[in-house]
Amino acid sequence: MNSNRYCVIMAGGIGSRFWPMSRQSCPKQFLDILGTGRSFIRHTYERFAKIIPNENFIVVTNRRYKQQVLEHIPELSEEQILCEPIGRNTAPCIAYAAYTLKQKNPNAEMIVSPADHLILNENEFIRVLESSLEFISKNSALMTIGITPTRPETGYGYIQRTTNDTISAVKCFTEKPNREMAQAFLDCGEFLWNSGIFIWRLADIIAAFEKYLPEHSALFGAIERKLGTEAEAEAIELVFSQCKSISIDYGVMEKADNVYVHSGDFGWSDVGTWGSVYQQSRKDRYANVLNGSTIQTYNTRNSLISLPKDKVAVVSGLKDYIIVDTDDVLMICPKDEEQNIKSFIEDVKYVTGDKHI
């Protein structure tokens, strides 16, 4: 394997849209929501381990999740887990990893990926990664992977490309559109879904931070010699208390003039909602997704039902519902109202405090 290739896995999110299964103590990336027998973060590691040396993985997560990362990926050492004291979105997360790599290998090539996405065709995904890595090795490019859209999806951001070539310069990024706009994007043919997966040379992303996020560059540059030493934790605590919360898309990718997108079609989903879990899961003859050992349904259609192991449930007369039961919380919600889950969380927190959150 190429020793200059590194994979940075971003694993600091809470995944509140998967409440009540996802909690602050054990968020989405550590769960087996799809019933595959492995967590999202384990799948992510195994996927990239096909082309990345084991010692070249870095996981950036909240410090409260360090031990969980090591439990799910025991192949990694503690030094490969970078611990954020507080969440500051993706730009500081990536800056932390980049300036850490700068101390280890200035010639590094970085793949940056969320910890919690689904990819069905991993062979095709690896082919797209290899093609992207070849391109950035020869060009000063900030590469992202765009997914060929199959429907007018309103839950994803979009990337407009300048040509329909496999690799194209990016014209613009667009936030999640309404249904009418998403349909127009699909009909246009110039737009791809934004996967949130990035490939670039370390030198190029460092230069981009210096140019487009100079405050972040200054903060991390000032402590870079402390990274990887006993002084790192205190230095990072100070930096994260001072740096602005901002996404890499907004802070760098939407401003830079050397941004490219590689189109791909490999069964990708960010599995961001219970609705997307329903879409990706195997269904019975009544279009129900049943995650549990003993679930009896009667006159129930188009519903997702998830139960703890060995719990018995009888569900009758429901159509288009989400039912998620855990040891201490039961949620029953129409599928078209799942956008209210954050409100549910706030109300439960108001009544019972943090113990169910």
Image: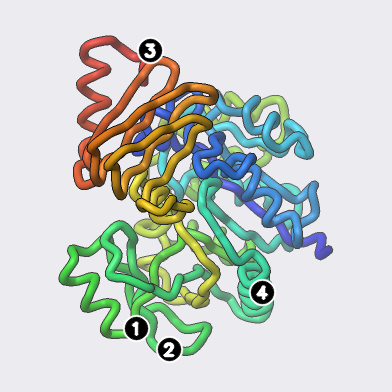
Marks 1 and 2 close (CB-CB < 8 Å): yes
**Residue at 71% in and 37% down:** 73
Which badge, 2 or 4, comes first in the chain's sequence? 4
**The C terminus appears in which quarter of the rendering?**
top left
* Residue 33 locus on image (x, y percent): 50, 39
Q: Residues within 10 Å of mark 3 (few under 14, many from 20)?
A: few
Locate residue 295 relative to residue 197 in the image: left or right.
Answer: left
Amino acid type at image mark 2: Asn
Q: CA distance from mark 2 to mark 4?
A: 19 Å
Q: Secondary structure at mark 3?
A: helix
Q: CA distance from mark 1 to mark 2?
A: 7 Å
Locate residue 217 relative to residue 158 in the image: left or right.
Answer: right
Q: Residues within 10 Å of mark 4 (few under 14, many from 20)?
A: few
User: Where does label 1 land, which residue?
Assistant: 190
Q: Is residue 156 above or below residue 290?
A: below
Q: Secondary structure at mark 1?
A: loop
User: Where does label 3 land, which residue?
Assistant: 355
**The N terminus appears in which quarter of the rendering?**
bottom right
Q: CA distance from mark 4 to mark 3?
A: 44 Å
Which badge, 3 or 1, comes first in the chain's sequence? 1
Q: Secondary structure at mark 4?
A: helix
Quadrant of the image occupied by residue 334: top left
Which badge, 4 or 3, comes first in the chain's sequence? 4
What mark, if any, has residue 72 been given in the picture? none
Q: CA distance from mark 2 to mark 3?
A: 50 Å
**Residue at 82% in and 60% down:** 3
- Which residue is nearer to you in this view: 273 or 53? 273
* Residue 139 locus on image (x, y percent): 61, 80
Q: CA distance from mark 4 to mark 1?
A: 22 Å
* Residue 38 locus on image (x, y percent): 63, 41
User: Where does label 2 land, which residue?
Assistant: 164
